[in-house]
Amino acid sequence: SGQALAKGMSYNANKAGEHGDAARTPQPGQTCPVPHPSATASTAAETVASPKVGAGVPPVGVCPAGDLDRVRADGGGQRLTTNQGVPVADNQNSLKVGLRGPTALEDFILREKITHFDHERIPERVVHARGSAAHGYFESYDDLSDLTRAAPFAAAGKRTPVFVRFSTVAGERGSADTVRDVRGFAVKFYTDEGNWDLVGNNIPVFFIQDAMKFPDLVHAVKPEPNNAIPQASSAHDTFWDFASLMPESTHMLMWQMSDRAIPRSYRTMQGFGVHTFRLVNAEGVAVFCKFHWNPVGGTHSLVWDEAAKITGADADFHRRDLWEAIEAGAYPEWELALQIFTEEQAEEFPFDVLDATKLIPEELVPLRVVGKMTLNRNPDNFFAETEQVAFCTAHIVPGIDFSNDPLLQGRIHSYLDTQISRLGGVNFHEIPINAPIAPVHNNQRDGMHRQSIPRGRVAYEPNSLGGGCPFQAGMAGFTTAASRSPQPPEDKVRGKPELFAEHYAQARLFWISQTPAEQTHIVNAFRFELSRVQTQAVRQRLVSMLANVDPILAEGVADGLGFAVPPAMPLATDDPAPHYEPSPALSLLSRPGSVGIQTRKVAILAGHGVDAVSLKAVYADLLAAGAVPRVVAPQLGQLAAADGSRIDIEISIEAGPPVLYDAVIVADGDTSAAMLSRDAGALDFIRQQHLHCKPILAIGSGKELLLKVGLTGDLEDGTADAALWMVDAGAVDAALEQFKAALAGHRDFKRETDGVAL
Ligand code: HDE
């Protein structure tokens, strides 16, 4: 095998033959030493030279890149071949009988090329089709072996490679990133003891309580089956018809109509495992656990009007943001936090921990931060990695176990099953991005697209001809956590536990935990979605559900739809609903983050005659703070500055419209300001930045633009706009500091006028 590697031949760690004699006569407890191709000089040079790695070469051994080297292909400096390795002389012309004659059937080169092309597509995921992913690693802060024997938590400082895919749910593969939707947050840990997939969302609860309802939910939200309208949107009759007949969805609907469903970036959203899981230690003692990912950069969302416009301006907004941040070395990070509780504690909670429409307030079970995940490498190839990665909730490792949550139980089946049709068979675990780093040895054989070449006569167990191998791992292997105490056997039943019947208390908890601006956004989102619904009875039924959550909410929505609040929907239980105090952690604004204005985009609007010195000073200042300033003007080319110097225009307004920037600065210069004040695009830029509550700084005569669109610096209520500055050239420094602070704080919702009637 060493020779094969030296020649640069492909290498597959799962091929027993390549492990040499050791693989033929395995000893008890032996694992195969896997020679690491990335150790070779040529591969190391390629990695360092790769522009993909950018400035931040991933620390050695922290991501599976090394293991993927065995399958990486790079045509640089190579001659063109067929898939059989036959050199191709002419890649321009098919083989014809005479220059003007028919193409010969024997042109195997043409036929191979076209045939491969004809079969390039695989079915997209039935949900979560649109996604983006990155490599990285998880680092445990502590040794958690008292709680779990799961490998990633075995020691403080231990690093486990991960591959993470973020997604929307409803849209098709080519749909826009910034639609209103739940976001998937799926993490594959390549642990020493096999792969663990934590397949979560950016919202901690779900629409339904039982897997039985999942196909109905998805059929309702997907484009309607007769005309395939609308794409990537829940704002249509069938979704709200279903939702309004499923009161258990109320809590999730509150989250989905909140700003959570229009994140600014994948980097600024939380992730949640949603279900209750179990952690199991080496003694077999189990505790319940909920998983939370909290972004180090803080949470931040778009506003709806902006999100809708970004859908047109840059459908790849989130994909691009993730890619660019990683290329720039601004590695996105999340801390992993656990809520740990026992079955005895769970019995005292006023809700059932097996009900995925309920969360556990942090006030009830505090978060314990246990580690950090860093994404530091973009995929080499979208299809091979992001598209072919197969997350399965069934992929757990020793130390992690399921709970009886009936939604989770159904998922354990669904994910493995769906990969079989999506990836064309049962061997999808051999696709490089899915292959574990831990060695794989079992008696499963054959099937479509088998990659490994199992050796020997023995494919059964027990055996004596193979020395009994592969042998059971015994105590070292996966065992299911024993439940707390032996339970009496129960009759089979289709039904739900009592506490599953209460649907509104936590929806109310969410509502009362939001700031007034966030509450307004929720009302407006319901108003928008239900305005798109054509069936009045559906609108009314939904509002009758909201009447059980909060009267102000129901009135706000009903008012926006032009009718009075109907009687509240009857409750499914006579039991009094639990009472919750507000939980500030449920507000998006409670997590400002700690990365300042790093990677935030600032447009500097400028025209001919601009003051070059002040523009360059502001530009340099923002760049030094880690932000991304861009000189934006009505068209490309160079600006003739007032001092005669020339400044490159980096992007035109039409290519870089206002919604793509987090803030705007209007540069100083009389001619520049006069020119921009006559440009409809420049004026619209200011209006939209204002509408979307973003910081605005006008330097010197730059204030002309603001005044032209009616911005005086005062708000409707007569108070000063705290995120708008019109300053003389001499006062820029102080204003710029305030501007940067406002940018770090994202937006000033005090400006908003939509919904003030509430
Ligand atoms: Fe999924 N879900 N789901 N889901 N889900 C899929 O698996 C399913 C649910 C989630 O980036 C599918 O590979 C059922 C909850 C993510 O590749 C499929 C039920 C949560 C992803 C499937 C649920 C999720 C999926 C489609 C109810 C948050 C994308 C393609 C019982 C905790 C993973 C695929 C990726 C994908 C089934 C509910 C998250 C069909 C049956 C709850 C992040 O297997």
Image (spheres, rainbow, N blue to C red):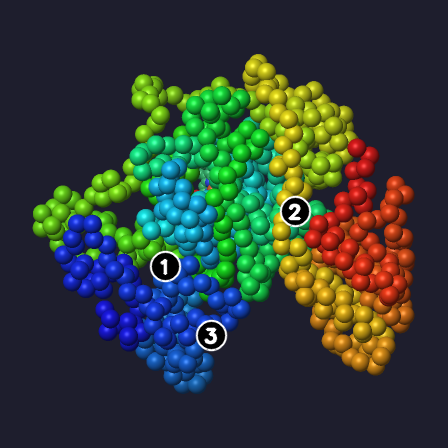
The residue under label 3 is 49
Q: Left of 338 or right of it: where is 624?
A: right
Sooner in the amino-acid sequence: mark 2 or mark 3: 3
Residue at 79%, 76% (x, y): give it. 639
Amino acid at circle 2: Pro
Q: Which residue lies furthest to the left in this view?
A: 465
Q: Residue furthest top?
A: 574
Sooner in the amino-acid sequence: mark 3 or mark 1: 3
Q: How crowded is mark 2: few (under 14 residues within 10 Å), some or many (20 or more)?
A: some
Q: Where is residue 466 in the image (x, y as percent from the top left)?
A: 12, 51
The residue under label 1 is 432
Q: Which of marks 1 and 2 is in front?
A: 2
Q: Left of 489 or right of it: where is 228?
A: right
Q: Position of residue 654 (x, y in %)?
A: 74, 65
The residue under label 2 is 592
Q: Which of 111 and 61 is in front in this view?
A: 61
107 lies above or below 351: below
Residue at 59%, 44% (x, y): give it. 181
